[in-house]
Image (cartoon, rainbow, N blue to C red):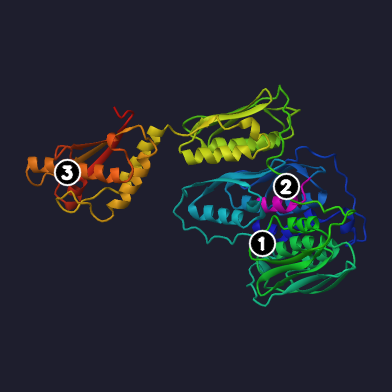
Amino acid sequence: MRDKLLKTIACSVALAMAAAPAAFAASSSQPVLLVAQADAAPYLWSATKSADGTISLAGDVPSTDVRDVLTDGIDKLGSDGTKVTTGAPADFSANAVAALTVLSDLDSGVVMFDGTSWTISGVVAGADKGATAQAAFDESPLKAHAAAYKVVVRAAETTVAAAPAKAPPAATAPAASAATAAATTSPAYAWSADKAADGTITFTGDVPNAKLKGFLVTHVAGKSVDNSTVADGAPKDFVGGALYGLNALMALDSGKLSFADGKWQLSGAAKSDDAKKSAMGQLGVIDTKAWTFDIKAGAPAVAATPAPATAAPAATATAAPAPAGYAFAATKSQDGALVLTGDVPSAALKAHFSAFAGKVDVAGLAVSANAPSDFSANAVGGLNALDELEAGQLQLADGKWSLKGNAPTPELRDSIVASLGKLPAGASFGATGVEGPPPLEYCRLLLAQTLDASAIRFDGRTPRFAKGSDAVLDTVAKALAICPDARVNVAGATDADGGADANMALSVARAEAVVNALGKRGIASKRLYAIGYGETLPLVAKPVKPADKAKNNRILITVDASTN
C-alpha cells in the first residue's frame, strides 16, 4: 500500500492546490466536470483499518479525482462511503493521503478529519512497527498541522524477527515510483522558478518526475516557460518545497524560488507588507527553518486584495452557540475505560470515537442532526484532554462544554487547561474543572520516586554524605517545597554491624545530617524532625552480601498533613 500511496501523493497535492477545475482542463482535451453537493459543515472524513488490513472510507471529498487518488492507493479497499462535497480546506487531499500512509503502517486504526483538526489512532504490535508509524507521522504534513497521534504499541505476539522498517514517506515529497523513492539524493540537484514583472514564470533545472513537471506548468495558470528536466536524486522534501514555494512565488509581483546546494531560497518583491505576509503564509505547512528569504515589500496598494491564507482557522475562534438540546458526554474511569453517550453529528465521527485508544463503549451514542458547527473540534480536543486525566468526564450540556477530572501532575494539569483554551469553546471549558493532585499527595509521590531511584548515601559508618548525595538532597528539597505546611519526618536506619547502641546513635546522626542539609536548602526547621531506628528496621534480614547490607543503611523521608 505504501508504494501505491507514494506514487499518488504528488497527484493528491496537486489536486489540493489547484486553483480551479480549469487548471486541470489545460492538461486534457476533455473538459473537467465536477458535480458536488453544497458545502459540508463541518467537513468530515475518515478511514478505518480493520485487523485484516481492509480500509474503509467515509465522509466528504472535494472531487471524484481526489476520491480516485485515495482509493487507488489502498491495496485492500473495503467500503467507500465518501461523497463529493465542496468546502474542503486547500490542503485536505495532501493530508488525507499522508494520513493513509501512516494508517498503512498500523495493524488497525482510524484516521479522521473533523473539519478543523486531524487525528490518528490505532494499534501496532512491536516497537519496530511503532517506530516506523511514528516516523511516518513525524515526517508528514500532519505533524505541522498539530494532528493528534494516539497509537498504542503492544508487545509483538511472536518471536519472529521483524522485517527491516520501511522508509517513511517524505513529508510532502513523494516519488513517482518505488525506484525513484529509493534513489540516492544528489548533492548537485538544482531547480528554480523565476517570475518576471509581466507574470511569466520560467522553470529550469531538475524535477523528480513527469507528473510534477507537468503540474508545475499547469498550476501557474498563466504564461510559463518550462526548461526543466526529469532527474533522480531529489531530496525527500523537494516536492513540498516546490509546490508550496511556488504558491508563495505566485503571490509576489516578481521573484525567484530556487533549490541549490541542498537549500531553498525565496526572494522577490511584494506590493505591500500584507502581500508579503500572504506569500509567507503559503509556506505554513512545511518546515522552512533552513530556508533563506529576501522579500522586499513596497508601498501598500489600496486596491489590492491580499491572497487568502491557506492556513486552517485559528483554534481560538469564537465558539458557535450550541443548541440547548444537543448533549454529549464521555466518562473515563480509573481503569482507563471510556463510555460515550449522547449525540454525534455523523456515523463517521462515531466510528472515529469507537477506535479511540483504550477500551471504548460507544453504544450510547446516537447520530443526531443540528450539532453546533464546532462540535467535532471541541469533542475531539476534549477527548484528547480527557485521555490525559486519570479519570474524569467531558460533557456538552445546555449549550456549554466542560471537562472535570484529576491530572497526575500540576504540570500536566496546566498543559491540559492551556490546550482546552485553544479550542473554539475554550471560554466555555474554563480553568476550574481540571484539578492537579493535592500538594501533600504529589509531594509523597515525588519523594517516593526520588528515593527509589537514588538513595541518600554515607561514607562508611559515618554521618558524612557520600558523593552524589547532594543532588538527591536538592531533589528532595524541591519536592518538600510543594507541600510547605506538611511535617517532614527524616528517619535513619542502619545494618546490624557493630553494637546496637552505636547503630542507634549513627542512625540519629545521619537523620540529623539530612535535616541540617534540607534546612540549608530552604526547608523551614519547624517542619523537620530527625528520628533514629538503628538496626531495628532492616529491609533484608540477616544480610550476607554487601549490597544487601547497603539496603539496610538508608534514610526514610515521610510527610504528614500538619506541622503540629
Q: Residue 288, which numbered label?
A: 1
User: With respect to residue 508, does 199 lie above or below?
Assistant: below
- Asked whether the viewer can see residue 523, the reply is yes
- The residue lying furthest to the bottom in this view is 188
Q: Earlier in the sequence, mark 3 or mark 1?
A: 1
Which residue in the protein does label 3 denote? 509
**Is residue 368 part of the magenta span, yes or no?**
no
Q: Which residue is nearer to you in this view: 29 or 423?
A: 423
Query: Which quadrant is home to the N terminus?
Result: bottom right
Nearer the N terminus, badge 1 or badge 2?
1
Residue 229, visible in the rendered structure: no
Query: CA separation, marks 3 and 2?
Result: 64 Å
Which disc number belongs to residue 312?
2
Q: Earlier in the sequence, mark 3 or mark 2?
A: 2
Q: CA distance from mark 3 to mark 1?
A: 60 Å
Tell me the magenta residue range: 88-100
Q: Secondary structure at mark 1?
A: loop
